[in-house]
Image (spheres, helix red, strand yellow):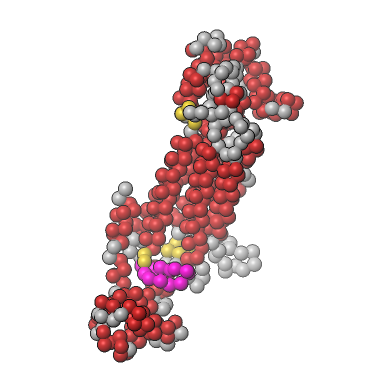
Amino acid sequence: MIPRYARPEMTALWAPETKFQIWLEIEAHACDAMAELGVVPKDAAKAVWERGKFEVARIDEIEAEVKHDVIAFLTNVSEHVGLEARFLHQGMTSSDVLDTCLSVQLTRAADILIDDLDGLLAALKKRALEHKMTVCIGRSHGIHAEPTTFGLKLAQAYAEFARNRERFVAARADIATCAISGAVGTFANIDPHVEAHVATKLGLTSEPVSTQVIPRDRHAMFFATLAVIASSVERLATEIRHLQRTEVLEAEEYFSEGQKGSSAMPHKRNPVLTENLTGLARLVRSHALPAMENVALWHERDISHSSVERMIGPDATITLDFALARLTGVIEKLVVYPENMQKNLDQLGGLVHSQRVLLALTQAGVSREDAYRLVQRNAMPVWRGEGQFLDLLKSDKEVSAALSDAELESLFNLDFHLKHVDTIFSRVFSA
């Protein structure tokens, strides 16, 4: 991932130094377990911890010759450990190291991303409560529908990301497995105790049956969950982009002092952050499909998944980490314009109350078909700028035969649409 869309903590997790350090810990913990079983001398296990180290450049140099990264790593470590290094990797296969390491990296990445989600949820909750009763127009198909509040928009986003957090906690648990089971996963040359010991030390659980690799359905679910979170990021980003359009301008990304929006037009204030988030979400989602295609490996294993995971592991988690942090900043600094919300709400001359009029007519004894016809008959002129909805309804003899002027006026009260906002907020935030 390019540095422009990366943050240091997540990037460091995928650095070669981090990966090889995890490899070394896997091998060292395995030696400890085998020493407990008497398979290797205790002094040899101690030597791995005391003298075991590596150099990335040296590993790369050896790999250029042997064409095998795990062998190159073991050779480099052996150069430091000495004679006792012959006990490294006893009964193990490369996938034991590679897959267990990937599980560690993905669980650590998940912990960072869960913290990111918590930060976003906190920001959404704060702004939702701030604008709980800030009335704005709700839109369906992009067209004015009925009144809602900006707080409800943010509460919806909060609930969605809260669900995403629950999904991701489950995906983290699912991916946090360890396989130290040897060639084809039968434990023929290594005791299951070794796997259990390594798993405990690394905060993982033992894979129930691993063939020679950890089953890739786990990874597919992990990356699919990342994709769902990314889709939620895009949904909220798209909402903000629409609200920032000049003709709408109900909310706007914070525009800092000295910021410039266009190289050609000095007046521009563009939604660049949310547009960027839309693009980043597409990238994260693109990694879900290859993760699913990795599930169908040949027999006990092949390595068709390897090149895929070396790319999508870092790229998907680094990108989503950046995106969640950026979205949190957007929400925290989002500029909201209640006056414009009210102006837009009033733009259609009261048409947003059409459903209330429809229902009131049916309650007054008018058939639904006739009520719909009467309301629509008076609504269409308002679209053409030919009057206010309430005035037209009052002057319609068929409507006034069923509803008095006072009754019609009572149907145009905005508070009617807000009476259950507290109930919805309680549902969302009480948990």
Is 422 on the left or on the right of 236, as rendered?
Answer: left
Using the image, determine if residue 122 lies above or below residue 100: below
- Residue at the front extreme of this rendering: 299
Is 141 contained in the magenta span? Answer: yes
Q: How many marks?
A: 0
Figure quadrant of the N terminus:
top right
Whether residue 396 appears in this view of the structure is yes
Span shown in magenta = 135-147
Q: Nearer the viewer, residue 58 or 177?
A: 177
- Residue at the right extreme of this rendering: 65
Residue 42 position, x and y percent, is 53, 10
Q: Quadrant of the rendered structure where residue 11 is? A: top right
Using the image, determine if residue 21 lies above or below residue 280: above
Residue at figure coordinates x 48%, y 33% from the top left? 176
Whether residue 55 appears in this view of the structure is no
Q: Quadrant of the rendered structure where residue 188 is? A: top right
Q: Nearer the viewer, residue 106 or 377?
A: 377
Q: Nearer the viewer, residue 228 or 62?
A: 228
Q: Nearer the viewer, residue 189 or 249?
A: 189
Residue at figure coordinates x 36%, y 64% from the top left? 149
Using the image, determine if residue 92 lies above or below residue 385: above
Q: Main secondary structure of the magenta part?
A: strand
Q: Quadrant of the rendered structure where residue 74 is? A: top right
Is 257 contained in the magenta span? Answer: no
Residue at figure coordinates x 47%, y 21% from the top left? 197
Residue 420 position, x and y percent, is 29, 62
Residue 413 position, x and y percent, is 29, 74
Residue at figure coordinates x 39%, y 57% from the top left? 156
Residue 277 position, x and y percent, is 54, 54
